[in-house]
Amino acid sequence: EDQVTQSPEALRLQEGESSSLNCSYTVSGLRGLFWYRQDPGKGPEFLFTLYSAGEEKEKERLKATLTKKESFLHITAPKPEDSATYLCAVQGPYAGGTSYGKLTFGQGTILTVHP
Amino acid sequence: GAVVSQHPSRVICKSGTSVKIECRSLDFQATTMFWYRQFPKQSLMLMATSNEGSKATYEQGVEKDKFLINHASLTLSTLTVTSAHPEDSSFYICSAKQGTEQPQHFGDGTRLSIL
Protein backbone atom coordinates (compact mmCIF):
# COMPACT_ATOMS: atom_id res chain seq x y z
CA GLU A 1 0.00 0.00 0.00
CA ASP A 2 1.30 3.42 -0.95
CA GLN A 3 2.11 5.71 1.97
CA VAL A 4 2.95 9.40 2.20
CA THR A 5 4.12 11.20 5.34
CA GLN A 6 4.62 14.94 5.46
CA SER A 7 6.57 16.90 8.05
CA PRO A 8 6.30 19.13 9.88
CA GLU A 9 2.54 19.25 10.42
CA ALA A 10 2.73 23.01 10.82
CA LEU A 11 5.45 25.55 10.16
CA ARG A 12 5.54 29.19 11.14
CA LEU A 13 8.05 31.44 9.40
CA GLN A 14 8.88 35.10 9.40
CA GLU A 15 8.71 36.81 6.05
CA GLY A 16 12.01 36.22 4.27
CA GLU A 17 12.93 33.19 6.41
CA SER A 18 13.66 30.31 4.01
CA SER A 19 12.79 26.72 4.94
CA SER A 20 11.86 23.30 3.56
CA LEU A 21 8.90 20.96 3.79
CA ASN A 22 9.44 17.21 3.68
CA CYS A 23 7.44 14.45 2.01
CA SER A 24 8.52 10.85 2.65
CA TYR A 25 6.90 8.19 0.52
CA THR A 26 6.62 4.46 -0.04
CA VAL A 27 5.26 3.32 -3.38
CA SER A 28 5.75 0.27 -5.56
CA GLY A 29 6.72 1.92 -8.80
CA LEU A 30 6.47 5.71 -8.70
CA ARG A 31 4.57 7.24 -11.60
CA GLY A 32 4.80 10.77 -10.34
CA LEU A 33 5.06 12.77 -7.12
CA PHE A 34 2.85 15.82 -7.01
CA TRP A 35 2.88 18.98 -4.91
CA TYR A 36 -0.28 21.00 -4.42
CA ARG A 37 -1.14 24.15 -2.52
CA GLN A 38 -4.53 24.39 -0.79
CA ASP A 39 -6.02 27.59 0.58
CA PRO A 40 -8.80 27.39 3.21
CA GLY A 41 -12.16 26.50 1.69
CA LYS A 42 -10.66 25.87 -1.75
CA GLY A 43 -9.56 22.89 -3.78
CA PRO A 44 -5.86 22.05 -4.18
CA GLU A 45 -3.91 24.02 -6.76
CA PHE A 46 -1.33 22.09 -8.78
CA LEU A 47 2.27 23.17 -8.32
CA PHE A 48 4.71 20.50 -9.55
CA THR A 49 5.10 16.97 -10.84
CA LEU A 50 8.37 15.09 -10.32
CA TYR A 51 8.98 11.71 -11.92
CA SER A 52 12.51 10.54 -11.15
CA ALA A 53 15.19 10.88 -8.49
CA GLY A 54 17.36 13.92 -9.03
CA GLU A 55 14.65 15.88 -10.78
CA GLU A 56 14.03 19.48 -9.69
CA LYS A 57 11.29 21.96 -10.59
CA GLU A 58 11.04 25.66 -9.72
CA LYS A 59 8.27 28.22 -9.67
CA GLU A 60 8.82 31.66 -8.20
CA ARG A 61 9.91 31.16 -4.57
CA LEU A 62 9.24 27.41 -4.61
CA LYS A 63 11.59 24.61 -5.61
CA ALA A 64 10.72 20.93 -5.45
CA THR A 65 13.29 18.14 -5.41
CA LEU A 66 12.99 14.36 -5.45
CA THR A 67 15.02 11.41 -4.18
CA LYS A 68 14.10 7.73 -4.16
CA LYS A 69 12.49 8.05 -0.74
CA GLU A 70 11.46 11.65 -0.25
CA SER A 71 10.72 15.00 -1.78
CA PHE A 72 11.42 18.47 -0.47
CA LEU A 73 9.61 21.69 -1.16
CA HIS A 74 12.04 24.53 -0.57
CA ILE A 75 10.58 27.97 0.04
CA THR A 76 13.01 30.84 -0.48
CA ALA A 77 12.31 34.22 1.14
CA PRO A 78 8.62 33.45 1.71
CA LYS A 79 5.94 36.11 1.75
CA PRO A 80 2.66 36.15 3.72
CA GLU A 81 0.78 35.19 0.54
CA ASP A 82 2.66 31.88 0.56
CA SER A 83 0.66 30.90 3.65
CA ALA A 84 -1.38 27.79 2.80
CA THR A 85 -1.49 24.04 3.30
CA TYR A 86 0.98 22.23 1.07
CA LEU A 87 0.01 18.72 0.03
CA CYS A 88 2.22 16.01 -1.37
CA ALA A 89 0.81 13.04 -3.27
CA VAL A 90 2.18 10.00 -5.09
CA GLN A 91 0.80 8.12 -8.05
CA GLY A 92 1.64 4.45 -8.19
CA PRO A 93 1.48 2.01 -11.07
CA TYR A 94 -1.81 1.40 -12.82
CA ALA A 95 -3.50 -1.73 -11.51
CA GLY A 96 -4.99 -3.14 -14.68
CA GLY A 97 -8.12 -1.30 -15.71
CA THR A 98 -9.27 -0.14 -12.31
CA SER A 99 -6.56 2.23 -11.12
CA TYR A 100 -6.68 5.28 -13.32
CA GLY A 101 -3.75 7.06 -11.75
CA LYS A 102 -5.27 7.66 -8.35
CA LEU A 103 -3.23 9.67 -5.87
CA THR A 104 -2.28 8.91 -2.29
CA PHE A 105 -2.05 12.16 -0.32
CA GLY A 106 -0.07 13.06 2.76
CA GLN A 107 -1.68 14.93 5.64
CA GLY A 108 -0.20 18.23 4.50
CA THR A 109 1.96 20.92 6.07
CA ILE A 110 0.22 24.09 7.21
CA LEU A 111 2.56 26.97 6.43
CA THR A 112 2.06 30.37 8.05
CA VAL A 113 4.30 33.26 7.04
CA HIS A 114 4.19 36.27 9.32
CA PRO A 115 4.98 39.75 7.99
CA GLY B 1 -5.36 26.34 -18.71
CA ALA B 2 -6.63 23.22 -16.94
CA VAL B 3 -9.59 24.80 -15.19
CA VAL B 4 -12.07 22.65 -13.29
CA SER B 5 -15.37 24.18 -12.22
CA GLN B 6 -17.43 22.71 -9.40
CA HIS B 7 -20.99 23.74 -8.61
CA PRO B 8 -22.56 24.56 -6.24
CA SER B 9 -19.91 25.86 -3.86
CA ARG B 10 -22.18 25.54 -0.85
CA VAL B 11 -25.36 23.61 -0.12
CA ILE B 12 -27.48 23.61 3.02
CA CYS B 13 -30.44 21.27 3.03
CA LYS B 14 -32.68 19.16 5.21
CA SER B 15 -32.04 15.55 6.14
CA GLY B 16 -33.45 13.12 3.59
CA THR B 17 -32.83 15.39 0.61
CA SER B 18 -30.77 14.26 -2.38
CA VAL B 19 -28.06 16.67 -3.51
CA LYS B 20 -26.32 16.78 -6.89
CA ILE B 21 -22.84 18.28 -7.35
CA GLU B 22 -21.44 19.01 -10.81
CA CYS B 23 -17.82 18.95 -11.88
CA ARG B 24 -16.80 20.33 -15.27
CA SER B 25 -13.45 20.55 -17.01
CA LEU B 26 -13.69 23.87 -18.86
CA ASP B 27 -10.74 23.87 -21.22
CA PHE B 28 -9.72 20.23 -21.61
CA GLN B 29 -11.25 16.82 -22.07
CA ALA B 30 -11.04 14.78 -18.89
CA THR B 31 -10.44 11.10 -19.48
CA THR B 32 -10.77 10.48 -15.76
CA MET B 33 -12.49 12.32 -12.94
CA PHE B 34 -12.14 11.74 -9.22
CA TRP B 35 -14.32 12.56 -6.24
CA TYR B 36 -12.85 13.26 -2.81
CA ARG B 37 -14.14 14.03 0.63
CA GLN B 38 -12.20 16.19 3.06
CA PHE B 39 -12.85 16.48 6.78
CA PRO B 40 -11.66 19.53 8.77
CA LYS B 41 -7.89 19.65 9.16
CA GLN B 42 -7.51 16.35 7.31
CA SER B 43 -6.24 15.41 3.90
CA LEU B 44 -8.27 14.34 0.91
CA MET B 45 -9.96 10.94 1.00
CA LEU B 46 -10.64 9.43 -2.41
CA MET B 47 -14.22 8.26 -2.77
CA ALA B 48 -14.39 7.09 -6.37
CA THR B 49 -12.81 7.24 -9.80
CA SER B 50 -14.83 7.56 -12.97
CA ASN B 51 -14.13 7.35 -16.67
CA GLU B 52 -16.41 8.75 -19.33
CA GLY B 53 -19.07 6.29 -20.34
CA SER B 54 -18.25 3.61 -17.76
CA LYS B 55 -19.24 2.80 -14.21
CA ALA B 56 -17.37 4.47 -11.38
CA THR B 57 -14.88 2.55 -9.27
CA TYR B 58 -15.56 3.13 -5.60
CA GLU B 59 -13.00 2.97 -2.80
CA GLN B 60 -13.47 0.47 -0.04
CA GLY B 61 -16.05 1.61 2.47
CA VAL B 62 -17.80 4.07 0.16
CA GLU B 63 -21.45 3.17 -0.46
CA LYS B 64 -22.12 3.24 -4.18
CA ASP B 65 -25.89 3.46 -3.64
CA LYS B 66 -25.40 6.44 -1.38
CA PHE B 67 -22.98 8.35 -3.59
CA LEU B 68 -24.11 8.06 -7.21
CA ILE B 69 -21.56 9.09 -9.80
CA ASN B 70 -22.32 9.76 -13.44
CA HIS B 71 -19.64 10.64 -15.97
CA ALA B 72 -21.78 11.42 -18.99
CA SER B 73 -19.22 13.23 -21.13
CA LEU B 74 -15.52 14.06 -21.31
CA THR B 75 -16.18 17.36 -19.55
CA LEU B 76 -18.85 16.58 -16.96
CA SER B 77 -19.15 14.32 -13.94
CA THR B 78 -21.83 14.50 -11.26
CA LEU B 79 -21.97 13.23 -7.70
CA THR B 80 -25.40 12.75 -6.15
CA VAL B 81 -25.62 12.26 -2.41
CA THR B 82 -28.87 10.36 -1.98
CA SER B 83 -31.07 10.74 1.10
CA ALA B 84 -28.43 12.85 2.80
CA HIS B 85 -28.07 12.78 6.56
CA PRO B 86 -26.07 15.01 8.95
CA GLU B 87 -23.14 12.58 8.89
CA ASP B 88 -22.80 13.25 5.15
CA SER B 89 -21.95 16.88 5.88
CA SER B 90 -18.47 17.49 4.55
CA PHE B 91 -16.33 19.23 1.93
CA TYR B 92 -16.55 17.38 -1.39
CA ILE B 93 -13.93 18.05 -4.05
CA CYS B 94 -13.67 16.79 -7.61
CA SER B 95 -10.65 16.58 -9.85
CA ALA B 96 -10.07 15.84 -13.51
CA LYS B 97 -7.13 14.73 -15.57
CA GLN B 98 -6.40 14.46 -19.26
CA GLY B 99 -4.42 11.37 -20.07
CA THR B 100 -2.44 9.06 -17.85
CA GLU B 101 0.65 11.22 -17.36
CA GLN B 102 -1.07 14.51 -16.61
CA PRO B 103 -1.67 15.86 -13.09
CA GLN B 104 -5.10 16.01 -11.53
CA HIS B 105 -6.65 19.47 -11.51
CA PHE B 106 -9.12 20.23 -8.77
CA GLY B 107 -12.35 22.14 -8.48
CA ASP B 108 -12.92 24.54 -5.59
CA GLY B 109 -15.06 22.11 -3.65
CA THR B 110 -18.63 21.98 -2.38
CA ARG B 111 -19.40 22.55 1.28
CA LEU B 112 -22.39 20.32 2.06
CA SER B 113 -24.30 20.92 5.29
CA ILE B 114 -27.22 18.63 6.17
CA LEU B 115 -29.52 19.91 8.92
Image (cartoon, grey):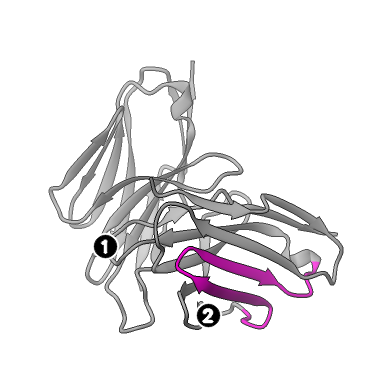
Q: Residue at x 22, y 41 (%)?
A: A57
Say which quarter of the image contains residue B100: bottom left
Pick whichever, A34 or B40, lies toward us: A34
Residue corresponding to mark 1: B101
Tell me where residue B29 appears, x and y as whole percent. Answer: 40, 62
Q: Is residue A2 magenta?
A: no
Q: Residue at x 14, y 53 (%)?
A: A53
From what the image shows, is residue A53 above or below residue B88? above
Q: Residue at x 48, y 74 (%)?
A: B50
Tell me where residue B97 appears, x and y as whole percent. Answer: 38, 61
User: Which amino acid, by three-letter code, is at mark 1?
Assistant: Glu
What crowding class fits label 2: few (fewer than 14 Cα within 10 Å), some (14-19), or many (20 or more)? few
Q: CA distance from mark 2 to mark 1?
A: 25 Å
What crowding class fits label 1: few (fewer than 14 Cα within 10 Å), some (14-19), or many (20 or more)? few
Residue range (magenta)? B63-85
Pick whichever, B14 or A5, lies toward us: B14
Q: Residue at x 35, y 20 (%)?
A: A17
